[in-house]
Image: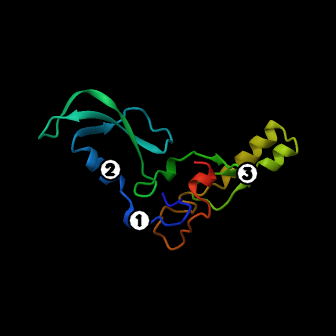
Amino acid sequence: MPLDADHGWTRRNMITAAEIRELLSVDYVLSSDPRDRDGAPAERFEVRARVPGTAEATGPVLGTVGIIASVTEPFCSDCRRTRITAEGKIMSCLFSREEVDLLGLLREGASDEQLAERWQDAMWIKPKAHGMDHVGLDAPDFVQPDRSMSAIGG
């Protein structure tokens, strides 16, 4: 994800979700996890061993693998995630440049209802995708957030 501290991320150096699935498919058969994704960032797959030289699976499910593909296969339209930064700010999107203060309310002794209202207000301004009103990290109006993902809290 383009949320690195030194802003050295480039699309040229990344591995896409399709490439990950292709690499795994050499030895394994991936099938969609039957559980609902329910807004989770990872698309999950059940993993079975591959019969050598075929596309057929053999044996039981070995486990589950999840691929988070926010760049190559965005899930923004189903995202319901938020974060609270170490500074007490609500971020409704990792790519957002907007943060809503929660710490100030806490220090003022705000009620649970006031905190919930502030959080709801933050979610009403949640961008549609990648910190913008449209999906597209290649879009000319995409601006990489100043803070890295680890500084945001992820």
Q: Residues within 10 Å of mark 3 (few under 14, many from 20)?
A: few
Distance of mark 3 from mark 1, alpha carbons? 30 Å
**Residue sitting at the far left:** 53
* Marker disc for residue 20: 2
Q: Of helix, strand and loop, which one carries label 2?
A: helix
**Residue sitting at the far right:** 108
* Marker disc for residue 11: 1
Distance of mark 1 from mark 2, alpha carbons? 15 Å
* Marker disc for residue 87: 3
Residue sitting at x 44%, y 66%: 10
The kind of residue tagged 3 is Glu
Q: Is residue 3 above or below residue 44?
A: below
Q: Is residue 59 above or below residue 19?
A: above
Q: How is the image coloured?
A: rainbow
The kind of residue tagged 2 is Ile
In the foreground, 46 or 121: 46
The kind of residue tagged 1 is Arg
